Image (cartoon, grey):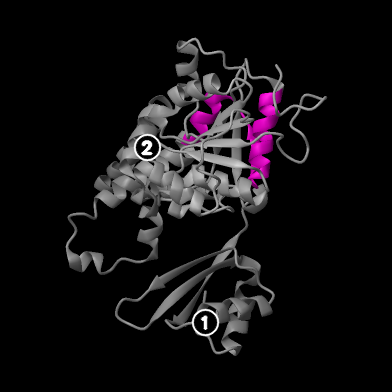
Amino acid sequence: MTSALSDEAGTPQGSGLTGPVLVVGAGLIGASVGMALGRAGVKTYLVDTDASIAHVAASRGAGSDDPAPDDVALVVVATPPDQLGAEIGRALSAYPDAVVTDVGSVKVRPLADLIAGGVEAGRYVGGHPMAGSEKAGPMASAPDLFDGRAWAVVPHEASSALAVATVEWLAATCGAVVTRMAAGEHDQAVARISHLPHLVAALAAGQLGSAPAEHLALSGQGLRDVTRIAGGDPALWRQIVAANAAPLTELLLSVRDGIDELVASLEDGDTERLEAVLIAGVAGTAAIPGKHGGPSLTLAEVTVAIPDEPGALARLFADTGEAGVNIEDVRIDHDPARAYGLVELDVSADSADRLVDALGTRGWSAHR
């Protein structure tokens, strides 16, 4: 196969593409891909069924919403899940010299749609950046959305070596870390680490709609942490969940078994069985990789009272840095009745006491 992407070695040229990139779909992910490519100096075009969305994305630096030229070298399909198979097929037909990828969260169904349609798919390789937000649309996009995040590259049996290398180049150019896997393996993985948590968060958040106002007045950061992702677009998540039904069903049945065990332990007053459920949860959180893909750090939480005024958070961060302590994570719990909040700093356990002492000497009220 000859492509505008290839050099004599048949791989994407080292500094980038020899032809432009076309992004199909200018929402959060598509616009962010365009912005990341623009940051790297790659000529990018955008198209969306809603021309105004493409125009907004273009105005934010995600590329040009002018008609794409014929020499497009790479097409990135960033449409909703229900449209992926059809849009990938259209891109393969419309740009016969281009590599085609997508950024959808499910990989088995689009590939099956292509095969069922008799599409020659050697130039197609699936992709899925593990980044996003509960917010949607190009106004939520950012050029650094993928920096340091995993990007699954999902070739199939007929994928050409050039296509695989090109999609890996795309992921790296957008700042992501490439993880190559098969379509079925990918869909099982995202069901476990993304789709199931979203559904569980939705179930938990769904219990709040009929809660009395005095109950909700007690809400804290823990509730916000658990339910935040439930704020995602229901129409989009309906498509994602339906497209990945088989592995999700298996996981949900396992969760149902866990809920049955939890209910039985409460009904029977069996605190040992209750504790076993909680211990399993602790073990699961410990299994989540830490930063840079390494093992999880043993963290401690340092809580600091902070006034609700300009510069207070910057001063706290500066004082923490001067104490030689690295902040691993941060949350802010605002007190609706008072003009201050509580900042929860996650730091390594062996530096927590030192940070509490250092902040105390600088006038902060801090405790573990």
Q: Is residue 171 magenta?
A: yes
* Label 1 Cα neighbours within 10 Å, binned few <14 / some 14-19 / many ≥20: few
- Magenta residues, dominant SS class: helix
Q: Is residue 32 magenta?
A: no
Q: Position of residue 215 (x, y in %)?
A: 22, 65
Give the alpha-carbon distance from disc 2 to disc 1, as whole Å. Answer: 44 Å
Name the residue at the top extreme.
118
Q: Is residue 196 above or below residue 107?
A: below
Can residue 326 be seen in the rendering of this structure? Answer: yes
Q: Position of residue 236 (x, y in %)?
A: 36, 39
Secondary structure beneath label 1: loop
* Marker disc for residue 311: 1
Of discs 2 and 1, which sits in the foreground?
Answer: 1
Q: Is residue 294 above or below residue 9?
A: below
**Observer-nearest of 162 and 327:** 162
Quarter of the N terminus within the rendering: top right
Task: Give the residue displayed 44% in from the left and 54% down from the top.
Answer: 139
Mark 2–mark 1 contact, CB under 8 Å?
A: no
**Observer-nearest of 121 and 232:** 121
Q: How many marks?
A: 2
Of the residues shown, which amino acid type is indicated by label 2? Val
Task: Give the residue displayed 61% in from the left and 31% down from the top.
Answer: 74
Q: Which residues are magenta?
A: 162-190
Secondary structure beneath label 2: helix
